[in-house]
């Protein structure tokens, strides 16, 4: 599968990655190559094979409905570039 | 069918609702942080909820049970195999950059909700699906002129998104849908239905069409947080769309919001791109497999739900569908009524509960749980009417005192001396006095002015401060007037 420039620009925008125009061609080529590589999987007939969700035979782990975590606001906020009064502070996002 | 009249004829509104209902649980959907409302900002946040690198989600089994319980309460198909997906988008209150949700394989499939409409009729609306997902954090935009403040306490709390079929045709039906869904969730104990605190939020899909035509293009009104606003937003939005179409324009599919101060809907994202959430199965979570026996166990613990209770109230107590609706809308109301009705005339019990009690509660802004009049005492009051200790009219006076003081009806009757006079001698002498004082009217009555009978009853009741037994007054008065 080969991607065109416009598709690559759209993917970059959805991922919020800034890509200069002159790099789009190059990226389109690289991404197309990756897709082509992965597409080889399509050669295997999986008509009657259920999707494999795990390599080990296990089921989804569950937790009890108990409060066992949280209550460490300072640790949570410590990586925030800006905080105030116990909140994360970000540029205004309202419209 | 009720249509809207436009310039070019009738229009039909088509409405579908997506309700986000916050699951009642102690901990979040995928972490052990608390869910309580109103905590200090960011005090109920784990590293999972704040999306720190390497943190993995582990599902809360009670939230699964709550979703299944809700599905069973909506008479819906329970999917024993369901899958969690990532819904990708960027927003400041979504630290993961994706919401864990369910897309192609939700935990609950098709179900239904029976609407109880104001005219007493019912209508069934289809439920498309119910899925589990994480809530996002909360953005506060009014704390700073150039900044937004983010509180992640709500981030990761379990939500049930309940999607209806586009089966509703009027704002009233949409209102009835939200009311009924809320009632069912509260009976089940899976969501508290508190719209002011945001534990129930509505996205409303509205389109219009000429009757019989295919569906029109819809607009989605996001995050409407009261039943009244849902109805107002639909009315406004339908008229807006009709106006555009009739002027030769076309509807753009878009997200709008309800402006609660200007009473209009307006476009939310001016340059909105087509949503591209790039859903894919969350690699951190295996599919959710349910044991059918476990689902059956949950089914056995379901309470009697509003529809069944309503049917029982109509057949067992011979109540009207309207009274039954009013009583079953909240479980606490229904329980109160049944306690009052036990061993008494159910129709009388229903009248007192829906009439006097609800009237007084409403005026006082109180819920039934806070009623100063207990079910036992209201029952006692009805007993006093039944055994002729007091008349129905005096009972209202006693009720007022009960509501103010919370005292027992018998005590109030004693204290205020309201016991009904059933002594025929005493009633007779009151009647004699009234007749003697109104000799002219007695003559008029005897010459055929029957209507005066009511006047005499009134005078006698006044003379006895309303305490005379009305049946005895009628009987003796009639005999004396005719004699």
Image (spheres, coloured by chain):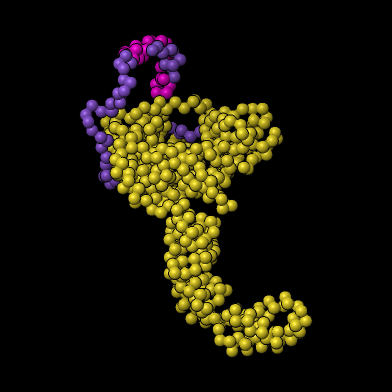
Measuring from the top left, give residue B51's x and y in whole percent: 32, 33
Residues in magenta, as a range: A11-40
Q: Which residue lies furthest to the front in this view?
A: B315
Q: Is residue B107 visible?
A: yes
Quarter where residue B44 is shown: top left
The prevailing secondary structure element of the residues shown in magenta is: helix
Foreground residue among B81 and B48: B81
Q: Residue at x 68, y 30 (%)?
A: B247
Q: Residue at x 48, y 45 (%)?
A: B113
Q: Residue at x 43, y 58 (%)?
A: B332
Q: Residue at x 34, y 28 (%)?
A: B281
Q: In which quarter of the image is the N terminus of chain B?
A: top right
Q: The purple chain is which one?
A: A
Measuring from the top left, give residue B248's x and y in whole percent: 66, 27
Count the labels in the image: 0
Q: Is residue B114 magenta?
A: no
Q: In which quarter of the image is the C terminus of chain B?
A: bottom right
Foreground residue among A23 and B243: B243
Left or right: B317 with respect to B284? right
Q: Which chain is yellow?
A: B
Measuring from the top left, give residue B482's x and y in whole percent: 70, 84
Q: Does the magenta stretch include residue A38?
A: yes
Q: Can residue A85 be seen in this view?
A: no
Measuring from the top left, give residue B240's x and y in whole percent: 62, 35
Foreground residue among B138 and B412: B412
Q: In this view, does B456 lie above or below A43?
A: below
């Amino acid at each position: 599968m080969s991607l065109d420039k416009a598709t690559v620009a759209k993917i970059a925008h959805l991922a919020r990655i800034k890509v200069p125009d002159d790099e789009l061609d190059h990226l389109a080529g690289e991404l197309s190559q990756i897709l082509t590589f992965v597409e080889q999987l399509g050669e295997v007939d999986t008509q009657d094979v259920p999707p494999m969700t795990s390599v080990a035979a296990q089921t989804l782990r569950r937790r009890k409905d108990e409060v066992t975590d949280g209550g460490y606001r300072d640790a949570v906020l410590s990586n925030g570039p800006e905080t105030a009064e116990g909140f994360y502070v970000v540029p205004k996002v309202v419209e | 069918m009720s249509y809207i009249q436009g310039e070019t004829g009738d229009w039909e509104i088509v409405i579908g609702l997506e309700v986000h209902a916050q699951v009642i649980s102690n901990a979040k959907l995928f972490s052990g942080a608390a869910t309580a409302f109103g905590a200090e900002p960011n005090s109920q946040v784990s590293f999972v909820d704040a999306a720190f690198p390497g943190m993995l989600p582990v599902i809360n089994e009670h939230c699964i049970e709550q979703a299944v319980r809700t599905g069973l309460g909506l008479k819906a198909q329970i999917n024993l195999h369901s899958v969690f997906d990532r819904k990708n988008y960027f927003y400041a209150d979504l630290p993961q950059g994706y919401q864990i949700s369910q897309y192609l394989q939700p935990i609950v499939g098709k179900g239904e909700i029976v609407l109880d409409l104001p005219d007493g009729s019912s209508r069934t609306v289809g439920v498309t699906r119910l899925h589990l997902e994480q809530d996002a954090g909360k953005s506060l935009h009014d704390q700073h002129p150039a900044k937004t403040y983010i509180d992640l306490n709500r981030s990761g709390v379990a939500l049930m998104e309940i999607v209806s079929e586009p089966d509703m045709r009027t704002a009233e039906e949409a209102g009835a849908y939200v009311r009924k869904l809320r009632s069912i969730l509260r009976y089940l104990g899976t969501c508290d239905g508190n719209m002011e605190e945001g534990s129930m939020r509505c996205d409303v899909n509205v389109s219009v069409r000429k009757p019989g035509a295919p569906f029109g293009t819809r607009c989605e009104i996001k995050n409407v947080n009261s039943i009244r606003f849902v109805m107002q937003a639909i009315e406004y939005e339908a008229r807006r769309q009709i106006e555009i179409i009739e002027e030769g324009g076309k509807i753009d599919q878009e997200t709008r919001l309800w402006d609660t101060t200007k009473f209009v809907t307006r476009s939310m994202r001016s340059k909105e791109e087509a949503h591209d959430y790039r859903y894919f199965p969350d690699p951190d979570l295996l599919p959710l497999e349910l044991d059918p026996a476990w689902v059956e166990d949950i089914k056995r613990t379901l309470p009697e739900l509003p529809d069944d209770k309503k049917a029982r109230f109509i057949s067992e107590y011979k109540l009207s569908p309207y009274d039954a609706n009013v009583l079953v809308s909240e479980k606490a109301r229904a329980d109160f009524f049944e306690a009052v009705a036990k061993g008494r005339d159910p129709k009388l019990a229903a009248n007192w509960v829906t009439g006097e009690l609800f009237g007084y509660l409403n005026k006082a802004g109180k819920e039934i749980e806070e009623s100063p009049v207990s079910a036992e005492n209201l029952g006692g009051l009805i007993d006093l009417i039944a055994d002729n200790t007091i008349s129905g009219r005096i009972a209202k006076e006693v009720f007022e005192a009960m509501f103010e003081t919370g005292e027992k009806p018998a005590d109030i009757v004693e204290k205020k001396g309201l016991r009904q006079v059933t002594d025929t001698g005493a009633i007779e002498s009151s009647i004699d006095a009234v007749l003697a004082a109104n000799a002219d009217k007695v003559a008029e009555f005897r010459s055929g002015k029957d209507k005066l009978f009511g006047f005499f009853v009134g005078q006698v009741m006044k003379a006895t401060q309303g305490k005379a037994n009305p049946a005895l007054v009628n009987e003796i008065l009639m005999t004396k007037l005719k004699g």
